[in-house]
Amino acid sequence: MTNKLAWKNIWRNKTRSFVFISAAFLGFAIALFTLNTMKSISQQRLDDAINIQTSYIQIHKKGFIEDKEITFTIPDADNVISKVKSINGVESISKHISSNAVMASPENNIVCEIKGVVPEQENKISVLKDFIIEGEQLNDLQKTPILVSKKTADKLKLKLKSKVVVTLKSANGEITGGTFRVVGIFATPSTPFDEGTAIARYNDLELLSGIKLPHELAIKIADPSKLKEVQSKIQSVLNNEYEVNDWMYLLPELFAFDSFINMIGVLFTVIIILGLGFSLMNTMNMIVQERTKELGMLRAIGQKKWSVFSMLLKEAGLMMSIGASGGILLGVLFVYMSSKHGISISEGLGFLGIRPTIYPKLNPELLGMISIMAIALTLLISAIPARRALKIKPQEALRD
Amino acid sequence: MKVIELKNVSKIYNPKGIAVQAVNNVSIEFSQGEFTAIVGASGSGKTTLLNIIGGIDTPSSGEVYVNNKQINQLSERKLTEFRRDNIGFIFQQYNLLPVLTATENVEFIMELQGKPKTEREARAKELLIAIGLGEKLNERPSKLSGGQQQRVAVARALAHKPKFVIADEPTANLDSKSTEDLLQMMQELNQKEGVTFIFSTHDQRVVDKAKRVIVFEDGKVKEDYTKNDNEKHKI
Ligand SMILES: Nc1ncnc2c1ncn2[C@@H]1O[C@H](COP(=O)(O)OP(=O)(O)OP(=O)(O)O)[C@@H](O)[C@H]1O
Ligand SMILES: [Mg+2]
């Protein structure tokens, strides 16, 4: 009966209950949708950066990251590769030559990083090929091919098949240069990457620079959640001549921005919690106030304290469940619809690596967190007025 | 048979440091099947006394026994159970639950006791029909007159077959016709089912129907007498 009573009591003051239920409904719908979208944006950025730029883990010779010195190659690279390959959780490895270079066309020139990759290896760890908007990806048949970004192509006035001269420092410390031919033009979500990167074949750069070993081994792992574990396994088979870093180290701004987004998410959640909590507290206070006499009567005729307490909590819980479950449902629907149609964000956020249109995915952890939040909020907030109800003395409540 | 026994019961209220002796060293007994009115001027201590008998309030000193069991020492939890299982309450303002139907209101205490649905329902219907509300079983209190609501309250008080029923000015909000009907109904229940009623009142017509009258003054029993069946007594 106390269940039934709690349920029926909700409808005693329809307007008031409706106000709270609507607040919970909107609050949860907006919270779920917004947080989920933010999380999706942040996740998409990270996925893009990892899949296009760094992969999950990279091995370098110690000192290379600070210096990018052309001679800082990975000693005994073949042996390192075969050792790392045999580690459980490592999916594939791609070796890179990486050098600062000047890229020049008859029109203009830019400074960038030129990366030499083995196409067949690189395609296993990188999705850059999916972002080629003109031309084709690198293969072994082309003659000194190069991939440049749309941004670079515009700046240097390059088209497919245009020639471009790449100048860099060779292994013996001299300036060396070579002519490459544009076979593909890419555009990724990240402006900094696009402005600063060109991709050539490993063999071609090896020949041009005269170095015999790669600067970088990029590693894709099978299960991203085991990142730290795989990283330390790799570290353990290599001596301290080598440096093994994960993407969080390699992409510090990205990682910081992700933390920032998470913080905004927390802040946003706190604001919604405060709003809803205040509304619930207010509602429950009024309920206890109005029903003092009735609650006193219930205690008088023999309803136990705990039963009165839980009855009030049930009433709050029911209101919250109606509002929150409706809101969560609507939120999920929003997410679903936007995952079909996409949400256009600004074109101008490429400098942060954010895609102009994003297709949010429902994050189950977030859904769980929001549901737990609803339950915890109800219990914590309504316990306060419900406790006050327990202090009602029947002999006083029943006097007029 | 003795149902309730008060021994040297006093109640002192002490709000804001000013002591008020609401009940002053009272010793009384109530027997099974009584139909007793407690009368007295406003502030004489009637409500306080009824609350102490009903285990809603505890005396400042003295002892209260129900069925030879001392109740004024019980823990709050035990006292709540005691009220639920042994006492029926009728209040001046009916105090029905507005969101429940007449039947559900009557079932409520049995539900608290954990009685099965079929038993509860049968008992509630039986009582409501007996008190002439067979037509109103599924009405909420707001659809009933004051007199009808108070009858539902009587049915609620009796539903779990309590040892006795306590009613603090049950007719104070009723018109004379409803008062008449309610008293007649209570009398019938008292005579036919042997339900023990102890009620307070200011109403002479109610006093007239009582078998025993206890007159209260300044927290003390001033008079306590039992009438012959056809005697009428004025206070
Ligand atoms: N909670 C309380 N705090 C302080 N004083 C109280 C309290 N309850 C009752 N009193 C005092 O105790 C005395 C007895 O009150 P009680 O309500 O028992 O009288 P009563 O006979 O029922 O009066 P009435 O006919 O007006 O209902 C009064 O003086 C009253 O003011
Ligand atoms: Mg009184």
Image: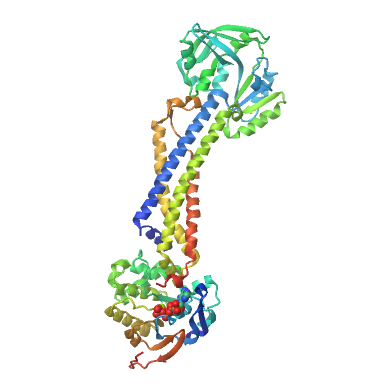
- The image quadrant of residue B35 is bottom left
Task: Say how many tags the image has.
Answer: 0
**Ligand 1: which quarter?**
bottom left
Can residue A272 be spotted in the picture?
Answer: yes
- Note whether A225 is above or below A53 in the view shown: below
Residue at (49, 57) in percent of width and height: A383
- The image quadrant of residue B98 is bottom left
Q: x, y (%) of residue A245?
A: 64, 27
- Note whether B97 is above or below A21 in the view shown: below
Residue at (45, 61) in percent of width and height: A311
- Note whether B220 is above or below A273 in the view shown: below
Q: x, y (%) of residue A159?
A: 45, 10
**The C terminus of chain B sits in image quarter:** bottom left
- Left/right placement of residue B46 relative to residue A229 reads left
- Note whether A41 is above or below A321 in the view shown: above
Can residue A326 be spotted in the picture?
Answer: no
- Viewer-proximal residue among B212 and A223: B212
Q: x, y (%) of residue A22?
A: 38, 48
- Viewer-proximal residue among A356 and B119: A356
- The image quadrant of residue A111 is top right
Q: x, y (%) of residue A321?
A: 43, 51
Instruction: Give the colour scheme shown.
Output: rainbow
